[in-house]
Image (cartoon, rainbow, N blue to C red):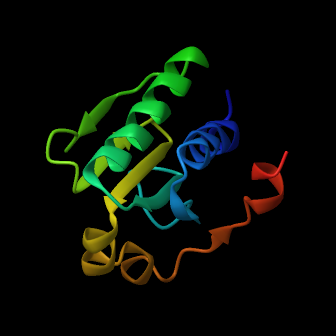
């Protein structure tokens, strides 16, 4: 599976669990950590955990290795490492505080809306 397909898989999983403000940053040439960052948030601890769990489940079903998942128990900022794609699932309050979109403001965003509608 390509990194773009992995990104879309994670975004669809987030969308399925009603994640809000799903943003994909193209990190190619900007970060050595991953090609894409997927950022989204939920409005409760349970929703944040459900989003991250759905990403993990969909990745495993699509035979994408989940390298690690951190922060699940606290459910404030869960990081799901899918190799070339790193998903950041925030609680709404934490997302505003850390503001990764501004931190990585030089990274172009990927338009996923049309693909999520399918």
The foreground one among 8 and 20 is: 20
Q: Quadrant of residue 3?
A: top right
Is residue 76 visible to the viewer in this orientation of the structure? yes
Is residue 26 visible to the viewer in this orientation of the structure? no
The foreground one among 3 and 51 is: 51
Residue 12 locus on image (x, y percent): 64, 43
Q: Is residue 54 left or right of residue 70?
A: right
Q: Is residue 3 above or below residue 59?
A: below
Q: Is residue 46 left or right of residue 60?
A: left
Where's the C terminus, which quadrant? top right
- Residue at x 29% of width, y 31% of height: 68
- Residue at x 55% of width, y 26% of height: 58
- Residue at x 63% of width, y 71% of height: 109
- Residue at x 48% of width, y 35% of height: 55
Q: Quadrant of residue 102?
A: bottom left
Residue 110 locus on image (x, y percent): 68, 65
Q: Is residue 97 above or below residue 13?
A: below
Residue 49 locus on image (x, y percent): 32, 41
Residue 106 locus on image (x, y percent): 51, 82
Where's the N terminus, which quadrant? top right
Number of callouts in the render?
Answer: 0
Q: Is residue 72 above or below residue 43?
A: above
């Amino acid at each position: 599976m390509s990194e773009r397909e992995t990104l879309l898989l994670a975004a669809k999983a987030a969308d399925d669990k009603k994640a809000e403000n799903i943003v994909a940053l193209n990190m190619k040439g900007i970060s050595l950590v991953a090609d894409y960052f997927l950022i989204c948030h939920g409005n409760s601890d349970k929703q944040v955990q459900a989003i991250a769990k759905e990403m993990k489940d969909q990745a495993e079903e699509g035979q994408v290795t989940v390298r690690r998942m951190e922060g699940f128990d606290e459910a404030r900022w869960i990081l799901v490492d899918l190799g070339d794609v790193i998903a950041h699932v925030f609680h709404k309050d934490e997302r505003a505080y850390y503001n990764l979109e501004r931190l990585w403001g030089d990274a172009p965003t990927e338009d996923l809306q049309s693909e999520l509608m399918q």
